[in-house]
């Protein structure tokens, strides 16, 4: 669209990354990831014409491996494009920065160093190197820093080194100033009796500001399983409902989150990236016997089944392992299983606006679809009596929990927070509510190169 305003015009469809411009502004580069596991690096004229592929990768059957990811960066001389490549090596996913000639040819790694995650790239104006936001190790998952990658030697060194997370990066014309987004979260766990958020009490964190930020769940005997960064170690923990007897269930050396307790209380199912790819895992309630079940996200479990999501829809598989069964190929997210194990509530994300859908655990089209207030439903959970589905919705930067009766009627707001965000929540069988609540801030910052 014009800088001074006007109607937007679609230029290119089916893009899988941010774009970058050629030095003269006449062409763009971007990634495109296909359904059959092919990932392509594409260039086109800035108006979308003359689109062509200059490099491709094949996933080899792994939906999380060997593809172009994140951003691309066109070199100042216009002869090459640097991009972020995700590869599977010995069952572990790693990312690297690679270049390919604009006229086509073999890709070449720009450094021998592998990273857990690389997010964005930007060339220095003189072509002597690139800047990137990256996390070197899995434990740095939520604290990506800004790195300098020299060219062509490939030496990598940190420019920033703090506890913040840096997202996105851009340079001015002579590379004397960079702009980036500096993000931070502060989350603590609250417990409310009888679902009354006005009576909630805060469980003060011991050494983390991120308790429950990526998942919190009740056990059958009234304990709380939660994600935490206590001591700087990403993982899943368990504690009493009053915050005592905290104990880590996972190793602390891996990235594990989105915990959920199976309906019979035997297992914690969760998402882990310990192999380098995002997968659904299961462990005993005491943290023993971890086992990967499949690739996927947002797991929930009955005594018999694990329900989870992939890019190809909603699935279930036996909790003891076995063949996955596809339940739906709709664009569903944030699933939750009803207390009787027969229904699944999900966010139906397409067509927009997003709605709340109820589907059978046996699969098929949605049985019921509800409009939601005020916007996209997230972090979905059933009430203990199974009569309503509750979800988090964000309005004016403040999130609250809403309730939708499955027999119909208007959604009702259950909480009335005056500030901040709800990151996750869950209901106990005796109607207690646990909430991870706090702030998510981001600031645009300038960093100058002082010589």
Image: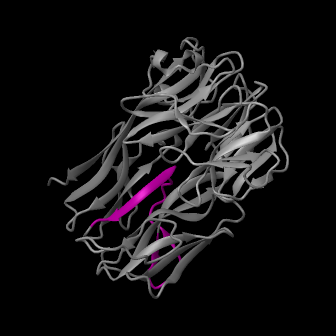
Residue numbers of the magenta segment:
99-124
Instruction: Please say whether residue 357 is visible from this viewpoint.
Output: yes
Location of the C terminus by quadrant is: bottom left
Residue at the limit of the structure toward the front, as seen here: 409
Location of the N terminus by quadrant is: bottom left
Tell me residue 147's x, y (percent): 36, 52
Position of residue 117 in the picture relative to residue 80 (left or right): right
Position of residue 126 in the picture relative to residue 257 (left or right): left
Q: In this view, does 218 lie above or below 137?
A: above
Residue at the limit of the structure toward the left, as seen here: 451
Verify whether residue 120 appears in magenta. yes
Camera-side residue of 415 and 38 = 415
Camera-side residue of 311 and 327 = 327
Tell me residue 202's x, y (percent): 46, 17
Verify whether residue 110 appears in magenta. yes
Residue positioned 56% across, 74% down in the render: 40
Camera-side residue of 327 and 267 = 327
Quarter-of-image position of residue 253: top right
Quarter-of-image position of residue 284: top right
Instruction: Please say whether residue 201 is visible from this viewpoint.
Output: no
Tell me residue 29's x, y (percent): 43, 75
Residue positioned 41% across, 28% down in the render: 417
Residue at the limit of the structure toward the bottom, as seen here: 50
Tell me residue 430's x, y (percent): 67, 17
Q: How many labels does the image show?
A: 0
Residue positioned 48% across, 55% down in the render: 113
Colour approach in the figure: one colour
Q: In this view, does 248 lie above or below 332?
A: above
């Amino acid at each position: 669209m014009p800088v001074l305003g006007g109607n937007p015009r679609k230029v290119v469809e089916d893009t899988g990354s941010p774009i970058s411009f050629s030095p003269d502004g006449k062409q763009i580069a971007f990634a495109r990831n296909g359904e059959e596991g092919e990932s392509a690096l594409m260039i086109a004229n800035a108006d979308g014409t003359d689109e062509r592929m200059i490099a491709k990768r094949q996933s080899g059957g792994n939906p999380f491996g060997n593809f172009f990811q994140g951003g691309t960066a066109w070199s100042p001389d216009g002869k090459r494009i640097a991009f972020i490549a995700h590869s599977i090596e010995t069952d572990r996913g790693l990312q690297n920065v690679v270049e390919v000639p604009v006229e086509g040819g073999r890709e070449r790694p720009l450094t021998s160093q592998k990273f857990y995650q690389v997010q964005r790239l930007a060339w220095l104006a003189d072509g002597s190197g690139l800047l990137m936001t990256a996390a070197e190790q899995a434990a740095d998952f939520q604290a990506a820093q800004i790195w300098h990658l020299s060219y062509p030697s490939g030496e990598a060194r940190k420019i920033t080194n703090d506890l913040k997370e840096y997202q996105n990066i851009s340079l001015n014309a002579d590379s004397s100033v960079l702009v980036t987004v500096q993000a931070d979260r502060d989350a603590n766990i609250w417990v409310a009796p009888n679902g009354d958020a006005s009576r909630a009490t805060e469980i003060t964190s011991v050494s983390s500001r991120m308790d429950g930020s990526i998942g919190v769940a009740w056990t059958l005997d009234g304990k709380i399983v939660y994600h935490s960064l206590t001591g700087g170690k990403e993982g899943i923990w368990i504690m009493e409902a009053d915050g005592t007897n905290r104990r880590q269930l996972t190793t602390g050396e891996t990235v594990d989150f989105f915990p959920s307790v199976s309906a019979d209380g035997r297992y914690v199912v969760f998402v882990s990236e310990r192999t380098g790819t995002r997968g659904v895992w299961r462990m005993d309630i005491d943290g023993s016997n971890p086992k990967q079940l499949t690739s996927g996200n947002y797991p929930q479990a009955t005594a018999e089944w694990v329900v989870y999501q992939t890019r190809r829809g909603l699935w279930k598989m036996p909790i003891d392992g076995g063949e996955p069964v596809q339940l739906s190929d709709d664009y569903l997210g944030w699933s939750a299983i009803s207390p009787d194990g027969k229904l699944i509530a999900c966010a139906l994300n397409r067509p927009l606006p997003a709605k709340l859908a109820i589907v059978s655990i046996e699969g098929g089209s949605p049985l019921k679809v509800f409009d939601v207030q005020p916007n996209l439903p997230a972090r979905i959970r059933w009430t203990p009596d199974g009569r309503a589905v509750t979800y988090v919705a964000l309005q004016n930067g403040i999130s609250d929990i809403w309730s939708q009766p499955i027999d119909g009627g208007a959604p009702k707001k259950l909480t009335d927070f005056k500030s901040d965000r709800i990151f996750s929540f869950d209901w106990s069988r005796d109607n207690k509510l646990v909430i991870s609540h706090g702030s998510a801030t981001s600031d645009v910052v300038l960093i100058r190169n002082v010589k």
